[in-house]
Amino acid sequence: MDGIQIESLTKTFRAGRVRALDGVSLAIAPGEVFGIIGPNGAGKTTLLGCLLGFLRPDAGRVTVAGHEPDDLAIRALTGYLPERLTLDRWMSGLDFLAYHHALARLPAASRASDAAAALARVGLDAEAGQRSIRRYSRGMLQRLGLAQALLGEPRYLFLDEPASGVDPAGVVLFRRLLAEVKARGATVVLNSHQLDQVERVCDRVAFVRQGRVEALETLHAGAELARVLRVRGPRGSIGGAVPREALEQAAARAGAQLREIAPPVARFAVGDDEGAVRLVQSLVAAGVPVAEVTAEEGRLERLFLEDGSAGGPA
Amino acid sequence: MNAALILATLRQRLASPSRLILLLLLGGTPLFVVLVSPRSGFAGLGDCYFLGLVFAAGMIGQDLSSGTLPLLLARPVTRAQYVASRWIAAAAGTFAVVTLQVLLAALIMLLRGVPLPWDEAALYLGTNALLALGVTAVMALLSSLAAGLGDLWLLFLVFFSAQVLEKVGQFKSWGWLVRGAEELLRTLRPEFSLTALAGGGPFPWLALVTYLSTVTLCLALAIVVVNRRELSYATSN
């Protein structure tokens, strides 16, 4: 019973006129990275609020490791990064981390060193640590918030739009930190609009709309090859004059993977933009005639679009 | 009680430039009275009611309006601990300023060759410690009810309403209304004077019970209000 159990959770606002959650049931396994996606107003943040014990459900129940979510024993094992990150702006970055270190009841003896290590972990230098939080940029605030959430290596991590406002290097750092968290067996609940990020880091994803879980998708977390490229050649080339083996070898040289051939189109899986460039170069070098290359939307993006929720995430 | 929260509250209160200026003005001005007439003793310092208001204003409400509360309450801190820590910090800060005032006033008296009334100083500090605990308890309750610095508006509203009711009661000769309004005004300023004890008369049990019950009730209600409050972007907007 170390995971998170959500049973028939219902939450309304404004005297029942707004139904934010409507009978949501989920079971999040220990060590799982679980994503929550859905359009604006779907109930994602309300769900996270119930998981953290900030909101009292009208009906249903949430348990974390068999306890109520606001149980102090669970709070001591919890890390949380809110969507609208408001920090105590009069503190310095290091003071803020030391403050949360103390609130988390972590040992005072290691407070200064733990705070400095947490700061370095999210790529903020010592000078930034001494600086007042009111002088932090949006991206720095988000990094500091993440450092705060990771203090004490929490067993349960709740992240609400963690990569919001973060530069590309920060996004990569966030993915790496999440991989570390997952590797040590923590359970992560991630609410994000950045579907490509969710697709890369989550084991499973719940698609929430109008307070209900409309779909549950199992993904392959940490998959190296997360993007799919469609490569089209002239008629008679791919799948004809250019055999499957030649395409597989060219893909392997670029660190990519041939998924399928539907002449004159071949679908390849690549890791990122650089992987895509390497694949095209490798295909051209192998003499494959390339007429057109297009990126396919991810699985979650397709889920969003197929759902017909006004063009996807806002 | 949570030591980290108490320290953070004290630092937060002192980090606001406008609050610091008000504290300097309220804490420094009475010292001029002592400077001008050192023989007036510590009575010239007045009391710490307004210092307490300045220290305590927005102690919970500012966390509600700024949005820092969810992050804080995601930690292993009960809401009762949170309220109690904020209250103790505000009272301790107020008392620290009063103590500094007394020390500076004593220094002025010494320099002006006036003998120091130590017993008076002890009674003054004790009475103001109780007043600081009282006024910050009232502010804890008001601050739990209103976001930002809305507690000051609530205080003004209750004070103004009580004054109006008192006048109406006097005009209509309704004794019960006058007494009710006076009780309301006393509730806004819970105090217990130790000077009365030094006088040697009967022990003022009623005043002590009234003081303790007001402080306890305010804190208990503040904890209930904070406990019942849901923390969500959905409800705050």
Image (cartoon, rainbow, N blue to C red):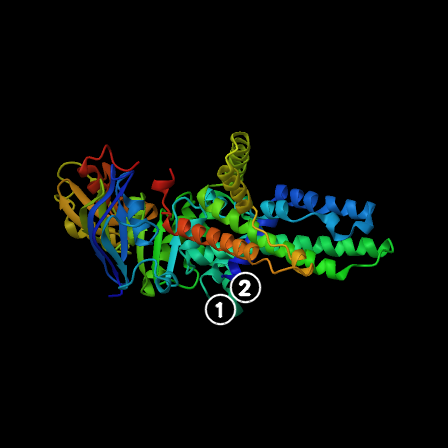
- Residue A186 drawn above or below residue B83: below
Disc 1: host chain: A
Instruction: Return the residue at label 1.
Output: A107
The image position of residue A193, as x and y in percent, is: 31, 43
Q: Quadrant of the C terminus of chain A?
A: top left
Q: Position of residue A10 (x, y in %)?
A: 22, 47
| B148 left or right of A48 in image | right
In the image: residue B101, left or right of residue A180: right
Q: Measuring 73% from the left and 50% from the top, which residue is drawn there?
A: B43
Residue B95, position in %: x, y? Answer: 63, 55
| Disc on res. A112 | 2
Q: Residues within 10 Å of mark 1 (few under 14, many from 20)?
A: few
Q: In the picture, which quadrant includes the N terminus of chain A?
A: bottom left
Residue drawn 50% across the image and 41% down it: B180
Q: Residues within 10 Å of mark 2 (few under 14, many from 20)?
A: some
Q: Give the image quarter of residue A240.
A: top left
The label on residue A52 is: none
Between the C-alphas of marks 2 and 1, the distance is 10 Å
Q: Amino acid at mark 1?
A: Pro
Please state the chain letter of the residue tagged with numbered disc 2 in the rendered image. A
Q: Is residue B114 left or right of residue B129?
A: right
Pick the residue in front: A58 or A138: A58
